Image (cartoon, helix red, strand yellow):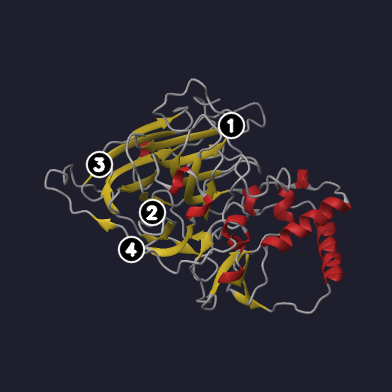
Amino acid sequence: MACHIVAKKRGVPSHLLLHLHLLVLLSFLLVAKFDVVSGLNYTKYNKQLSSLRLERIQKHLEKINKPALMTIESPDGDIIDCVHKRKQPALDHPLLKSHKIQRAPSEMPKVKMLKPDEARGSRSNEAGVKGSAWQMWHRNGTRCPKGTVPIRRSSMQDVLRAKSLFDFGKKQHGFINPTRRTDAPDVVSGNGHEHAIAYTGTSQEVYGAKATISVWDPSIQEVNEFSLSQIWILSGAFDGTDLNSIEAGWQVSPELYGDSRPRLFTYWTTDSYQATGCYNLLCAGFVQTNSRIAIGAAISPVSQYGANQYDITILIWKDPKIGNWWMGFGDNTLVGYWPAELFTHLADHATMVEWGGEVVNSRANGKHTSTQMGSGHFAENGFGKSSYFRNLEVVDADNSLSSVHDISTLAENTNCYNIKSSYSTEWGTYFYYGGPGNNPRCP
C-alpha cells in the first residue's frame, strides 16, 4: 500500500470539530477494537467517559497536534503531520520560550584510532547483517517540505488507552530498591519492569554513547505491557527524585501506539520519571530538526529468525560548546536534540550509560508475562536468532568516541531474559540479550 497525501481541512469551526471528534469517539466506544497485527483486544478500554474528560482530552490533543502544512498517511495507518519547525511542541516548554533552535551541532564526536593492543579478540562471524532498518511512512519517497518536521499525530484512542491523561506518553517507573548497590544501575522490577542490560561504572564523566541495535518485533501479552531496546544516558541519584535520563531506541508498545510494530522512540526525565518528560514529542521538550525522521514511527524491515538481520544505529552526545544533547540515527543522520535548559545533572555530564532491553511484567494471570524481549530468544542462541547490541561506544570529555571495554551486565531473572557480552574486532564490545518471558523455568 503506497503512502498518499491527505488534504488538510481548513475553515471548520472548532465546535463542529469537537462534535466530529465526539462522533468518532462514540463509534470507538461502540465497536470493540481488535488489533489484527498482535491479536490484542482493547475492549476493556471502551468505557463511558464524562463530557468534561472528553473536553480535557480534546484540548490536550489540540495542544500537541500542531497545525500541519502537509499531512501524509503512512501504509501502517499513522498520520504524519508536517509542522513548521518553529511551531513544534518543544517550544511550548516554559524553559524554552526564548529558545533559538540550533540548526546543527557545533561538532560531531571524533572517532579515536585504536591502539594495536586494543584491536584484540577473534574476528567475529556475526558481521553478516543484511542492512539498516528505516521508517515506513516515506516508503514511496514522500517527504515533509523543507523547514518542517514530521510529527506522528496523536488520536483520542491513543489517549484513552493510557491509564489517565496525566499518564499519557509517560513511563511508569519501578520502585527504588533500598538494597541496591551504589554502583549498580537503576533497574529494579518493583512494579514489573524487568531488564537485561550492560552498563558502565559511575566513576567516569560521560558525554554521550552509541550502539547499533538489531530490530525485532517481539510479541506482547497485554495491552499495557511493552518491550523495548534502548540506550540510557543517566545522571543524578538513583535513590532520589532528581535522576536525569535521556533515552532512545526502538519499542513495541500497544498501549502507546495502538499496534505491535517496533517504533523509533525517545524519552527524557529530570525527576526520576515522576512528572517531567515523556515519550517522543508527546510533551514539550525534545527539539526536532530533521524533516525525514518521524519519532514514534514504525521501523521497517525487521530481523527474522534464522534469516536477514536488520539494525539501527543510535548516537547521543552533548554538544561541547552549546550543551544540548543531540541524537543521531543511522549513518549520523541528525534527528534533533534535548535542550540543555531542561536538565539539572545532565546540564553538566552523565555518570552512567546503559544499553539493553526492558519489558513490563504485569503478571495478569498470576504468571510471568509471555511478553518477549528482543527476538524472544535467549542470548546463547547467538547471531540470527538472538537480539544484539554491537559496537558499544561512549563519548568522553574531548568529544571523542571510543569503544567500551569495561562493562558490567545485569538481568533480574535469567530464567526469563538474559544477556551475554563479548568482544570482536568487527563488532567491538557487543552482547546478545533477550528471552521469551514465561516458560517452564520462568513460571
Q: Earlier in the sequence, mark 4 or mark 2?
A: 4
| x 38%, y 53%: residue | 317
Q: Residues within 10 Å of mark 1 (few under 14, many from 20)?
A: some
Label 4 close to label 2 by CB (< 8 Å): no
Element type where label 4 sits in the image: loop
- Judged by depth in the image, the label closer to the viewer, 2 or 3, is 2
Mark 2 element type: strand
Q: Nearer the viewer, residue 207 or 157?
A: 207
User: Which residue corresponds to mark 1?
Assistant: 192
- Is residue 347 at all visible to an observer of this figure? yes
| Tags 3 and 4 touching, CB below 8 Å | no
Up-down relation of residue 77 to residue 180 (above or below): below
Q: Residue 340 location, x and y as percent?
A: 47, 54
Q: Residue furthest left?
A: 116
Q: Identify residue for label 4.
A: 107
* Mark toward the start of the polypeptide (3 vs 4): 4
Q: If you read the primary sequence from the N terminus, does the residue marked by circle 4 or circle 1 appear first?
A: 4
Task: State the mark number for residue 317.
Answer: 2
Q: Secondary structure at mark 1?
A: loop
